[in-house]
Image (spheres, rainbow, N blue to C red):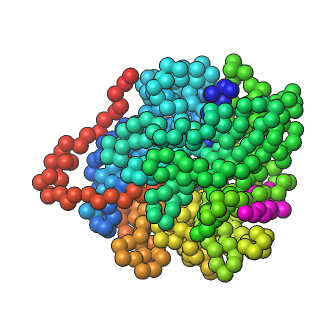
């Protein structure tokens, strides 16, 4: 199989969504929200306003799209046209003793090295990586072979914590490992297993960007879809749940999701004729105390597009070329027991839905509650830069939806709208107090409101369906809200919300800390550089040695701001 085309399938991206609420976006949003990082930074001090609680210690990581190219250049490949297609970089705010340091670096990938070779000028380098919707310059794409020592992934969706390490992830089966202190890329994550322990003809095609963690806070659970390509007339799509322990991905559950498919049935256009027989897309999955639940969206992959292609064919954008959404086929929810590692049930909805992110899931009194963000549209297709800057002609409604399941027969009892009087029609990036309330009954979820860029943070009470807001504030565009529990917390919302914010007034990135209980600002730290649009964030707790004032001043004097060394 053409490895480049397979990579298009597994490098897929997370999602923001578009709101219809009226609010004037900044005039310079194209140059800031979709701008270009001009420098890489080692950690340097920031200016802090207000009060940053000194018990917050660790790294607040944010995925940032470091460049989208020249938006005024009409040439193919001179710019990314979709919000998912920027070149990945990590921005980090290091919290210690009430102070905040800022660092930023691009991931050292094949695509970055090509862009870097052309002096950070996409007019010259063109887009040379797999994209979701943006056209690729074919000549530059072929130059990947000149950088075989670097990973071909563009890992700018989210972060996974694996032991003491962190990997930046897209939706491939392995992410990019980087050092938290230097932010330097260390290569593709060095898992001990070889292809999950399966033969090479078992090929991963969809590895959801979002993981879960066990009660020990260490065991990582993930899901992948694997395609058996040993016989192209008898293709089976297997869905697998796995865990990560001691740097090894260990299969737990394997079941057949789709197939057998026969590539001889592909029509002249390279399309499989039976839509319902295709494998569905999964971006996140649910976990309760005793079960995993996989909401397999009716966003179907067409494998004929792969098998009918030739190595000499143009490289096509992944989502635009290989996936089709339908609302007319029921959505499957597959339930897997943690104890038996077996599929124990399944329910379907009458409508085809697209699931992006989870709020939380739990069991209580014989019922299972599954809370997640759902849609009745191919939301990915509408998230172009043009749509976000100019507002889309087709608005999308987010459903903050609860599915209630009778665990005696796994039947769907009812669906509940948790945000019925929505101030924002579109919300995304849902998070909770995961450390203490994952897989347990809970009260609060935190989200973003979009308009159509992210303008507001939301605290939603899922019991009362009432919400409070931070924002919108003139020129400020926040991102995913991350909850950090306070020491010795008693209430669920004892803690802070930390979010990365682009200040379009100054073209600078800032980090804002809110009191989670009152949802009011405690303090903020201002970086020295622009931070364009990005997807998910993650806080990695660390305890640092307390420094004397003398050593702190010496550290600051030695810190540097530099641009990367050219190849």
Residue 481 shown left or right of residue 94 in the figure: right
> Which residue is painted at 48% across and 23% down in the image?
147
Q: Nearer the viewer, residue 237 or 357?
A: 237
> Which residue is painted at 87% across and 42% down in the image?
274
453 is higher (above) or lower (below) than 135 = below
In the figure, residue 226 lies in which quadrant?
A: top right
Q: Nearer the viewer, residue 81 or 564?
A: 564
> Which residue is painted at 54% across and 64% down in the image?
431
Q: Nearer the viewer, residue 376 or 145?
A: 145
In the figure, residue 347 lies in which quadrant?
A: bottom right
Q: Position of residue 15 (x, y in %)?
A: 61, 50
9 is higher (above) or lower (below) than 351 = above
Q: Position of residue 153 (x, y in %)?
A: 53, 35
Q: Which residues are magenta?
A: 344-354
Q: Residue furthest left?
A: 550
Visible residue check, residue 84: no
């Amino acid at each position: 199989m053409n490895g480049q085309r397979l990579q298009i399938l597994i490098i897929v991206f997370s999602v923001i969504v578009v709101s219809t609420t009226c609010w004037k976006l900044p005039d310079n949003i194209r140059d800031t929200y979709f701008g270009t990082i001009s420098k890489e930074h080692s950690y340097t001090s920031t200016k802090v306003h207000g009060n940053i609680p000194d018990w917050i210690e660790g790294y607040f990581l944010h995925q940032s799209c470091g460049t989208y190219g020249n938006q005024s250049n009409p040439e193919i490949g001179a710019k990314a046209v979709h919000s998912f297609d920027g070149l990945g970089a990590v921005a980090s705010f290091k919290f210690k003793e009430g102070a905040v340091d800022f660092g930023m670096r691009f991931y050292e990938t094949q695509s970055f090295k090509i862009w870097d070779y052309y002096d950070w000028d996409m007019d010259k380098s063109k887009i040379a990586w797999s994209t979701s919707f943006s056209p690729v310059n074919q000549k530059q794409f072929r130059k990947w072979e000149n950088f075989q020592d670097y990973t071909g992934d563009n890992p700018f969706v989210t972060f996974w914590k694996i032991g003491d390490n962190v990997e930046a992830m897209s939706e491939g089966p392995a992410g990019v490992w980087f050092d938290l202190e230097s932010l330097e890329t260390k290569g593709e994550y060095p898992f001990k297993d070889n292809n999950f322990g399966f033969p090479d003809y078992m090929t991963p095609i969809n590895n959801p960007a979002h993981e879960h963690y066990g009660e020990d806070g260490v065991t990582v659970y993930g899901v992948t879809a694997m395609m058996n390509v040993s016989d192209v007339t008898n293709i089976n799509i297997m869905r697998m749940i796995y865990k990560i322990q001691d740097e090894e991905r260990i299969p737990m559950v394997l079941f057949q999701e789709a197939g057998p498919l026969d590539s001889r049935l592909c029509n002249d256009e390279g399309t499989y004729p039976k839509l319902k027989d295709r494998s569905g897309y999964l971006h996140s999955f649910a976990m309760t105390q005793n079960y995993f639940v996989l909401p397999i969206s009716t966003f179907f992959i067409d494998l004929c597009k792969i098998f009918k292609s030739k190595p000499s064919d143009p490289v096509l954008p992944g989502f635009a070329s290989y996936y089709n959404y339908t609302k007319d086929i029921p959505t499957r929810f597959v339930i897997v027991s943690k104890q038996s590692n077996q599929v124990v049930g399944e329910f379907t909805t009458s409508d085809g839905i697209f699931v992006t992110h989870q709020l939380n899931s739990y069991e209580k009194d014989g019922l299972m509650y599954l809370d997640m963000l759902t849609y009745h549209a191919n939301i990915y297709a509408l998230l172009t830069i043009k749509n976000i800057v100019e507002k889309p002609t087709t608005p999308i409604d987010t459903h903050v939806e609860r599915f209630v399941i009778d665990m005696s027969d796994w039947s769907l009892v009812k669906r509940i709208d948790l945000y019925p009087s929505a101030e924002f029609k579109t919300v995304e990036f849902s998070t909770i107090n995961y450390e203490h309330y994952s897989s347990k009954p809970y009260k609060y979820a935190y989200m973003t409101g979009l308009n159509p860029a992210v303008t507001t943070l939301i605290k939603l009470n899922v019991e009362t369906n009432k919400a409070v807001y931070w924002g919108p504030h003139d020129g400020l565009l926040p991102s995913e809200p991350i909850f950090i529990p306070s020491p010795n917390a008693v209430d669920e919302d004892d803690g802070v919300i930390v979010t990365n914010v682009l200040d379009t007034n100054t073209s600078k990135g800032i980090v804002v800390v809110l009191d989670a209980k009152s949802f009011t600002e405690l303090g903020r730290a201002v970086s020295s550089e622009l931070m364009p649009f990005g997807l998910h964030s993650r806080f990695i707790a660390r305890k640092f040695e307390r420094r004397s004032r003398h050593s702190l001043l010496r550290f600051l004097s030695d810190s540097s701001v530099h641009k990367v060394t050219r190849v």
